[in-house]
Amino acid sequence: MSKRVHDEPAFVLHRYDWSETSLILEVFGRGQGRIALVAKGVKRPTSQFRPVLLPLQPLLLSWGGEAEVRTLKSAQWQGGHVMPTGDALLAGSYLNELLMRLLARDDPHPRLFDDYALAVQLLSERSEAQPLILRAFELVLLRDAGFLPDLAREGSSLQPLDPALPYVLQPEAGLRQAHADDPHVMAGHDWLALQAALETDTPLLAAMRASLPVMPALRAQLRTLLHYHSGVQVFRTRQLMLDAHALTRPRSDAVLPQAPA
């Protein structure tokens, strides 16, 4: 019997051409997790779905079917924030790429969904906070996907961190005390602050605050973890921003904005 889902809060993460008139959608739903949907006829100019099925927009979706790719039945915009633009749009696409690479299909993450929805809203409203939003979302994503170790303990001994000592984060071993030649180290009290932030009722906002004092080092530490668990060396959206900046870069070698991750 076909399974029907009605009015699921969801976001479109990515879209693929399926035929001359249809699309395959990669969707992140609050109660269903990441799933694939076929949107039949959506590319026709008369389709009611055409102006709705856009990334980074809060939607209510209904679908049916039990195959790996279900069939979209209805879609409506929930309203709220405007769609991010410019660098914020590319930053949101980076969040989508992370979800595509790190989340398995049909694995619900309602808490992460709420953090993602907030992150997208903040990107559209507070462009100056973009680096903090990205670092905080990387942390909550790694935690919910099961890839982030306890940031309050050493990985090998499970002993509590010494707030005064420097530590580095390793993909398989967790935190270890830093060596003299380790780059991008962070003090124990900074890791403890991040762990405490993730345990609050508003982890994204708390992680943004805790990330502020350690942004450059945290960015490098999390990038190592993300690359390891995603299996890629450079995220596509990061490369797109680097390429776009290279095309518009003046010959005077001016300082350019940073890529999202």
Image (cartoon, rainbow, N blue to C red):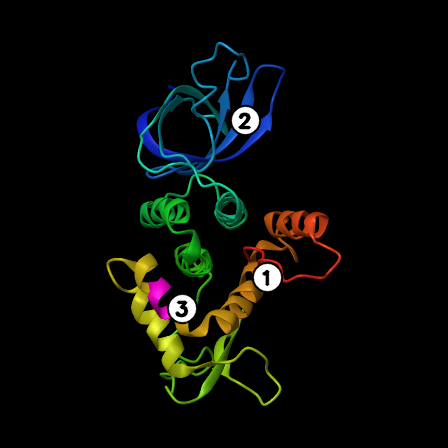
- How many numbered markers are drawn? 3
Q: Is residue 34 left or right of residue 231?
A: left
In the image, farthest residue toward the right = 251
The residue nearer to you, when weighing 172 against 151, is 151
Identify the residue position indicated by label 3 in the image: 211
Distance of label 1 from label 2 (alpha carbons): 28 Å
Q: Earlier in the sequence, mark 1 or mark 2?
A: 2
Q: What residue would you read off at disc 1?
A: 228
Q: Which residue is drawn at 47% across and 59% down?
A: 131
Position of residue 255 measured from the top left corner of the image (x, y, whole percent): 63, 62
Q: Is residue 218 depicted above or below 141 in this figure?
A: below
- Check disc 2 and report the residue beneath it: 24
- Highlighted magenta segment, given as a residue range: 207-211
Q: Is mark 3 on a helix, strand or loop?
A: helix
| Residue found at x 54% / y 26% | 24
Residue 83 vertical placement versus 223 (above, below): above
Q: What is the distance, in whole Å, between disc 3 and disc 2 at their CAs? A: 36 Å
Question: Quarter-wise, where is residue 140 in the image?
Answer: bottom left
In front of the other: 233 or 120: 120
Image coords of residue 112 (percent x, y): 36, 50
210 is within the stretch colored magenta: yes
Q: Distance between the residues labelled 3 and 1?
A: 21 Å
Q: What residue type is labelled 3?
A: Ser
- In the depicted structure, whether residue 144 falls above or below residue 84: below
